[in-house]
Amino acid sequence: MFPIEDGATIWARQTIQSDIFTNKPDKWFKIWFYLVNRMHFSDNEKLQRGQRFLKYEWISEVTKATKNQIDMFMRWAKKNQMLTTQKTTRGMVVTILNYNYYQTLDNYKTETETDLKTKQKRNRNDTILKNGKYVKNEKNKTLYGDFILLTEEEYQKLLKDFGQSNLKMMIEKLDNYLGADKKRIKKYTSHNHVLRGWVAERLELNKKTIQRDFGTCPKCARSNIDLPVNIQGIHYCLDCGRTLKT
């Protein structure tokens, strides 16, 4: 087979978890992808590794982004310390910050077969089988429902503060919430704190029979009907934490 022309660019797998990939307009990542791929891989007489002379017109021609879209992306990227630009008489010099770090293959961790086996063994030791479900094995914690883990001390304090009836409803609410999306199980490491946080606030909110329809969250697109309020009385999204205007 013939060698592939123009070399290659390294992209970390965690790129698909980045803010620009998951939360920003599609054109923004297209612009970012283009810029990173256009950078010089090595120093030359005029520019350094990770730099490139560019014009808005060139970026627009390839990405089909408008001048306004490019400008909005550039402002955001500079604010987030992803790149810098230096104006010239004919265009601009774009510098991708940390280009050398991300384009050096030795900086990427790889798992050897031994590492992988050790990790798998450790993961097995960190889980227990309870009622046909695997849950994290945390010492001195009791499983309530399918997913809620509490120490005896935590449970007794919750029982004292909220009462048996309320605590039962709180545990059921959090248990159902975690069960609806397994990704949430890893997100919440202290069920005691969560129960005392938005779960308790939601319980109090329900008692007041306050119901507001915010439509969908502009950040994560979750349906936001009758969301909880925090201690300042401000409504917020359960999934991403974004404050919602009343």
Image (cartoon, helix red, strand yellow):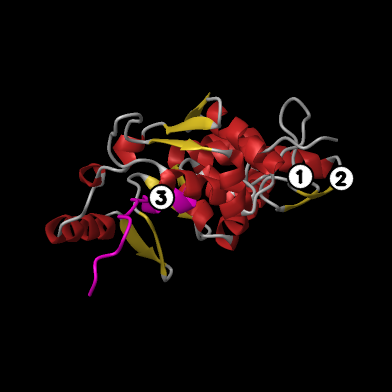
Q: Give 80 or 63, whichever is nearer the viewer.
A: 63
In the image: residue 73, left or right of residue 113: right
Q: Give 9 or 226, whichever is nearer the viewer.
A: 9
Horizontal and vertical percent for residue 175? 58, 55
Instruction: Classify residue 20 by image quadrant.
Output: top right
- Position of residue 24 relative to residue 122, above or below, is above
User: Does any portion of residue 31 appear in the rendered image?
Assistant: yes
Give the labeled residue for mark 3: 14
Horizontal and vertical percent for residue 162? 66, 37
Give the labeled residue for mark 1: 227
Is residue 128 shown in magenta? no
Q: Which residues are magenta?
A: 1-17
Q: Residue at left 28%, top 57%?
A: 123
Is residue 11 shown in magenta? yes
Q: In the image, which disc is placed on residue 4? A: none
Disc 3 residue crowd, few under 14, some 14–19, many 20+, Cα 10 Å: few
In the image: residue 123, left or right of residue 71: left
Is label 2 in contact with label 1 (beta carbons under 8 Å)? yes
Alpha carbons under labels 2 and 3: distance apart: 37 Å
Q: Main secondary structure of the magenta part?
A: loop
Point out the image quarter for the N terminus.
bottom left
Identify the mark nearer the N-term, 2 or 1. Answer: 2
Alpha carbons under labels 1 and 3: distance apart: 31 Å
Which residue is the extreme one toward the front?
90
The residue type indicated by label 2 comes to: Arg
